[in-house]
Image (cartoon, rainbow, N blue to C red):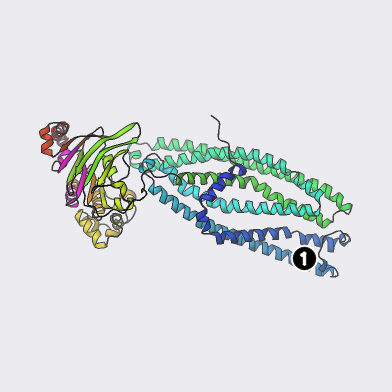
């Protein structure tokens, strides 16, 4: 398998065009700042071209006036005293330098501000896009890699725009302008000066390719390190419980050391490239001086002309020395841009269909018709599933692990779409409605209640952003959470740790119930909400759940059949199929799979109590 060839500026050009086209709507919003930056850039280039001319005139008009017949001068200076000419030229030097500095400042500031605005908009758009990608994508994607794209890749684009792209354009324009002036002054010296360019381009391209290979390896390793670190930090409780710190530290350290070696190798190659360019510049300067002095002695050029040549040569080769660095940075930035675009081009598997309408207020009737679903084409999870639930009914979904219970309620939330069949609410297929109007009408309480690093009030209000303070307090009381919330240091304004780590499991679950309650939804999903709680917490949570689900269509997933035996309907799932359906008494009388599982749990209860 052949390795992918690293990008240079030339090979990266199609990618740059694609990036500009993709981000054009964001760029267009900042076009005033961008055009101002480019106007100042060209003005700065003009001042840079003018800089050596006062020195040329000093040589030709003041120091060595004998050459003034041959020079290209300013007629207005003839007849003036040498001291006055010298004074005017000195003032001109200061004025040109001041104007060049002013234009450079305007160019850099306007471009930096425009780039910051554009990249801020792109980051917000990218984050919003990631939020809306389907769970099928997030289940496979690495969170560390996504975070890197939102932060590091966006920042690299912004920095390169200001630090590399703008200077590269400025230096290219300056180089072209200086070559034009040199040809105008003396074509022979100009040919000598630019003859070194082919050799320069060949050597920098060769070295640049090597740098890109190393930089790509380093970039890939940094992404892997970020993903590994995010995974370990996100599972810190498991890491510490299993004493995995040393093993993970060793793995991370090895990756870090390899990244360090690759970084040092890239720096070594860049330093070698810069030294090579300096040697080429010295050769070009020596050749121009050798021939230029001869032409000066012959009277073909003036000393001032030769001074302009040498100054231009030094200034022109300065951007050439930085060309490889800039093109390398831009090539790497195009890789970041491609990563961002590739992510933004991913379409959610679940999205609003054309013609989707806002859902009306749900009554709570749910129907599945011949639903088949699989996460992968060769691994069926649900097969030909059909059932009907009336508004207000409490439905228990039971069965062994991996039978498709959580997948079923995920289809109800339209986190996934069935491969075949349909899921309907109030006799309408869910795909007829917009996601923004569907999901807010369904409340959910999970086994692992996710709380955010925000205040208690904010965490409850996430269930319904338009809820009033009175609504939030009422929801907390319904969830048996109000009393312990008021005892927190700042009550409802208490800041919670990440994922609610500062609260007990029962407290987290009751806040999650309050978040579900404040939504006032017609349909409630409970996915193992009491698992892992102690007896006291389980009692409080269960009582709150019963209040939450009053007059609501409820789907309660549970492994503990004793907690759901009073349900209006019980669905027994196994291997993705609905094997049995009915009330507890119906299924016990049927004496099938449900009855066997119930009796097995009944026999285990005394053992569990003894243990």
- Does 555 appear in magenta? yes
- CA neighbours of label 1 inside 10 A, class few (<14), some (14 to 19), many (20+): some
Write down the residue under mark 1. 89
Q: Looking at the picture, how far across and down is residue 309, in whole percent?
A: 78, 53
Above/below status of 528 relative to 1? below
**Which residue occupies 79% across, 46% down?**
192
Q: Looking at the picture, how far across and down is residue 368, in whole percent?
A: 24, 41
- Does 426 appear in magenta? no
**Within the image, what quadrant is residue 585 found in?**
top left
How many marks on residues?
A: 1
Quarter that holds the C terminus: top left
**Which residue occupies 44% across, 46% down?**
147
Front residue (pair 224, 190): 190
The reply, left or right, for residue 382 in relation to residue 80 is left
Callout 1: SS: helix
Residue farthest top in this picture: 1
**Within the image, what quadrant is residue 518 found in?**
bottom left
Q: Is residue 166 visible?
A: yes
Front residue (pair 90, 194): 194
Q: Looking at the picture, how far across and down is residue 121, in whole percent?
A: 47, 55
Residue farthest front in this picture: 355
Q: Is residue 504 visible?
A: no
Q: Looking at the picture, how far across and down is residue 105, in whole percent?
A: 61, 61
The reply, left or right, for residue 497 in relation to residue 531 is right
Give the magenta-colored segment's residue range: 542-571
Front residue (pair 575, 557): 575
């Amino acid at each position: 398998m052949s390795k992918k060839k690293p990008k240079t500026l030339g090979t990266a050009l199609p990618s740059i065009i694609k990036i500009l086209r993709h981000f054009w709507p964001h760029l267009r919003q900042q076009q005033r700042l961008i055009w101002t930056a480019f106007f100042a850039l060209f003005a700065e280039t003009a001042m840079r071209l003018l800089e050596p001319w006062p020195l040329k005139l000093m040589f030709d008009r003041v120091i060595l006036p004998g050459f003034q017949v041959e020079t290209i001068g300013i007629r207005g200076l003839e007849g003036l005293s040498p001291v006055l000419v010298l004074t005017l030229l000195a003032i001109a030097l200061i004025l040109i330098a001041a104007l060049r500095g002013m234009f450079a400042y305007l160019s850099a500031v306007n471009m930096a501000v425009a780039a910051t605005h554009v990249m801020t908009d792109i980051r917000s758009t990218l984050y919003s896009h990631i939020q809306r990608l389907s769970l099928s994508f997030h289940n496979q994607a690495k969170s560390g890699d996504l975070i890197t794209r939102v932060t590091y890749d966006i920042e690299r684009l912004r920095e390169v725009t200001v630090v590399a792209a703008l200077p590269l354009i400025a230096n290219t324009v300056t180089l072209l302008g200086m070559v034009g002036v040199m040809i105008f002054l003396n074509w022979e010296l100009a040919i000598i000066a630019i003859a070194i360019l082919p050799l320069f381009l060949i050597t920098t391209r060769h070295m640049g390719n090597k740098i890109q290979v190393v930089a790509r390896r380093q970039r890939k390793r940094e992404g892997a390190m970020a993903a590994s670190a995010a995974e370990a930090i996100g599972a810190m409780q498991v890491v510490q419980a299993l004493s995995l710190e040393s093993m993970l530290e060793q793995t991370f350290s090895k990756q870090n050391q390899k990244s360090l070696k690759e970084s040092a190798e890239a720096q070594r190659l860049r330093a070698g490239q810069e030294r090579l360019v300096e040697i080429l510049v010295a050769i070009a300067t020596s050749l121009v001086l050798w021939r230029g002095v001869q032409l000066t002695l012959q009277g073909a050029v003036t000393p001032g002309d030769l001074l302009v040549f040498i100054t231009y040569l030094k200034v022109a080769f300065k951007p050439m020395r930085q060309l490889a660095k800039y093109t390398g940075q831009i090539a790497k930035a195009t890789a970041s841009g491609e990563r961002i675009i590739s992510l933004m081009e991913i379409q959610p598997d679940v999205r609003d269909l054309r013609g989707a309408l806002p859902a009306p207020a749900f009554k709570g009737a749910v129907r599945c018709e011949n639903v088949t679903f699989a996460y992968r084409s060769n691994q069926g999870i649900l097969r030909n599933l059909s059932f009907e639930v009336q508004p207000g009914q409490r439905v228990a979904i039971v069965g062994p692990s991996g039978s498709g219970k959580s997948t079923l309620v995920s289809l109800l939330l339209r986190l996934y779409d069935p491969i075949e069949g349909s899921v309907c609410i109030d006799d309408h297929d869910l795909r007829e409605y917009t996601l923004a109007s569907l999901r807010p009408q369904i409340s959910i309480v999970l086994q692992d209640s996710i709380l955010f690093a925000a205040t208690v009030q904010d965490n409850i209000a996430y269930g319904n952003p338009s809820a009033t303070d009175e609504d939030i307090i009422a929801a907390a009381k319904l969830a048996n959470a109000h009393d312990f919330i008021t005892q927190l240091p700042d009550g409802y304004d208490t800041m919670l740790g990440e994922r609610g780590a500062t609260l007990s499991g029962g407290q987290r679950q009751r806040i999650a119930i309050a978040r579900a309650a404040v939504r006032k939804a017609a349909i409630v999903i409970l996915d193992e909400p009491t698992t892992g709680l102690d007896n006291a917490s389980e009692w409080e949570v269960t009582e709150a759940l019963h209040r939450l689900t009053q007059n609501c269509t409820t789907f309660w997933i549970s492994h503990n059949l004793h907690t759901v035996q009073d349900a209006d309907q019980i669905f027994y799932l196994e291997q993705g199929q609905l094997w049995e359906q009915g009330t507890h008494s119906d299924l016990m009388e049927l004496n099938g799979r449900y009855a066997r599982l119930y009796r097995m749990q009944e026999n285990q209860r005394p053992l569990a109590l003894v243990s």
